Image (cartoon, rainbow, N blue to C red):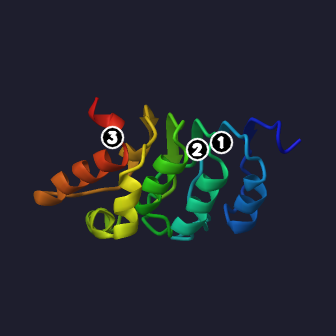
Amino acid sequence: MTESLKYLTVKQGASLIIDVPLASSIQMFRNLINLDIPDFHDRGEGQCTFKLDNDCVTELAMALPQLESLVFGYPCEKNTCATTVACLLQISVHCIKLKKLGIHLSATNIVEDLKSLSEDSQFRELRSLPRCTLRRSDLNLMPLTVYGPGRRAVVDGMISIFPSWTS
């Protein structure tokens, strides 16, 4: 069954926490094309129930290379979660067929995070690999206020992660 499952939608309950045990259980479905955990929202005052970090998201992306659609909620309204734009490059490289992306992530330090992506040798190697041709994302929902040179850094950084956005 793990080989044949192509679509997985996890319906949310009030107590759903997206954490390492949940992600680990999903990783066994290596032929997934569509993974959807919709309508993700923070619970309570600053208590983010999305408990994955960049490394966990990277592991998931590496385990699920057939993904065409990955929806892990929407960008973090309160910027309190542990995932950042650094995981986006990993997703783009490891899920080369990805066309749709929604992910819970924090944009608190987005300019610095994107700058470190361009300077880190590991990420430089990743940027030399083919990346997905993302057509649709919810990244425009990030709570983001960036002015001046920071705005250009964000645009350039996102295009380096998703080069298809220039076409």
Say which residue label 1 marks.
36
At a point 57% along the width and 54% down the height, the residue shown is 41
Amino acid type assigned to the residue bearing label 2 in the image? Val
| Circle 1 or circle 3, nearest the eye | 3
Q: Residue 81 at x, y = what percent?
A: 50, 67
Q: CB of mark 2 within 8 Å of CB of mark 1? A: yes
Mark 2 residue element: strand
Residue 38's image quarter? top right
Q: CA distance from mark 2 to mark 1?
A: 5 Å
Amino acid type assigned to the residue bearing label 1 in the image? Asp
At a point 41% along the width and 56% down the height, the residue shown is 126
Say which residue label 3 marks.
163
Q: Residues within 10 Å of mark 1 (few under 14, many from 20)?
A: some
Question: From the viewer's perspective, is 114 left or right of 17?
Answer: left
Q: Residue 99 at x, y = what percent?
A: 50, 34
Q: CA distance from mark 3 to mark 2?
A: 20 Å
State how many labels appear.
3
Q: CA distance from mark 1 to mark 3?
A: 24 Å
> 132 or 21, which lies in front?
132
At a point 46% along the width and 40% down the height, the residue shown is 132
At a point 60% along the width and 65% down the height, the residue shown is 56
Q: Quadrant of the N terminus?
A: top right
Say which residue label 2 marks.
71
Residue pushed farthest left? 148
Q: Can the viewer see residue 16?
A: no
Residue 149's image quarter? bottom left
Q: Mark 2 vs mark 1: which is more N-terminal?
A: 1
> 38 or 94, which lies in front?
94
| Circle 3 or circle 2, nearest the eye | 3
Relative height, residue 20 to residue 127 (above, below): below
